[in-house]
Image (cartoon, rainbow, N blue to C red):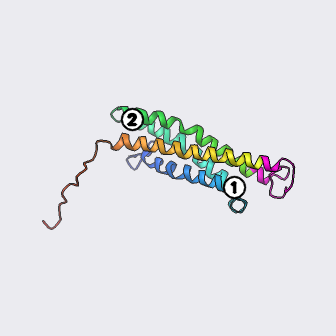
Amino acid sequence: MFTEFSRLPTHILLVHAVVVLLPLTAVLLVLCATWPAVRRRTGVVLPALALVSLGLVPLTTHAGEWLERRVSPSPLLHAHTELGDSLLPWAFGLFVVGAAVWLAHRLAASPLSDDAAGRPGGTVLRVALIVVAVVVAAGTVVQTYRVGESGARAAWQGQFSQQAAPRQHDDD
């Protein structure tokens, strides 16, 4: 599978996409759930972005497992890999809720459709969908942060000095 790119482990490249796209999708989910003008303007972007984000998580995890077998084991690395496995359910939830927000407002028969003002149950469903969107978005962002922070610790803790190294000038 796709484990190296230009002689670099793909995990270190894919991680950047996951760390940007999951929180971006989470913010867009909350905006689309709460703000009809944003929802109408973004259209299918929300579920599409959520699907791309979801697909990147197992690719990144697989590339990380490949990389894990090629570096020295440590407790920090073990903690990172354990946390990394917990991100997929959040990404899946982000996709499901994103698709639900998009569909609920697109389907004419839905009490949440943009042309269904005053249909029974619309307010309760709208509030419930907003609450679920906020919970899933917040959980996704928090878990993405936790995984990323543990990965940074595993990669960098003890690998740099607090003091800057003296710089060598080319004209010396």
Residue 21 placed where, x, y %?
55, 52
* Tag shown at residue 34: 1
Image quadrant occupied by the C terminus: bottom left
Q: Is residue 120 magenta?
A: yes
- Front in this rendered view, residue 118 or 86: 118
Q: Are marks 1 and 2 in contact (CB under 8 Å)?
A: no
As shown in the figure, which amino acid type bears the numbered disc 1?
Thr
Callout 1: SS? helix
Q: Magenta stretch?
A: 103-124
Residue 96 placed where, x, y %?
68, 43
As shown in the figure, which amino acid type bears the numbered disc 2?
Leu
Assess disc 2: are there few (<14), some (14-19) or many (≥20) residues with their C-alpha within 10 Å of its C-alpha.
some
* Tag shown at residue 77: 2
Residue drawn at point x = 59 percent, y = 37 percent: 89
- Front in this rendered view, residue 2 or 142: 142
Above or below: residue 37 compared with residue 5: below
Disc 1 vs disc 2: which is toward the camera? 1
Residue 157 placed where, x, y %?
32, 42
Residue drawn at point x = 15 percent, y = 68 percent: 171
**Can residue 15 be seen here?**
yes
**Can residue 44 be seen here?**
no
Residue drawn at point x = 17 percent, y = 64 percent: 169
Q: Is residue 118 magenta?
A: yes
Residue 95 placed where, x, y %?
65, 45
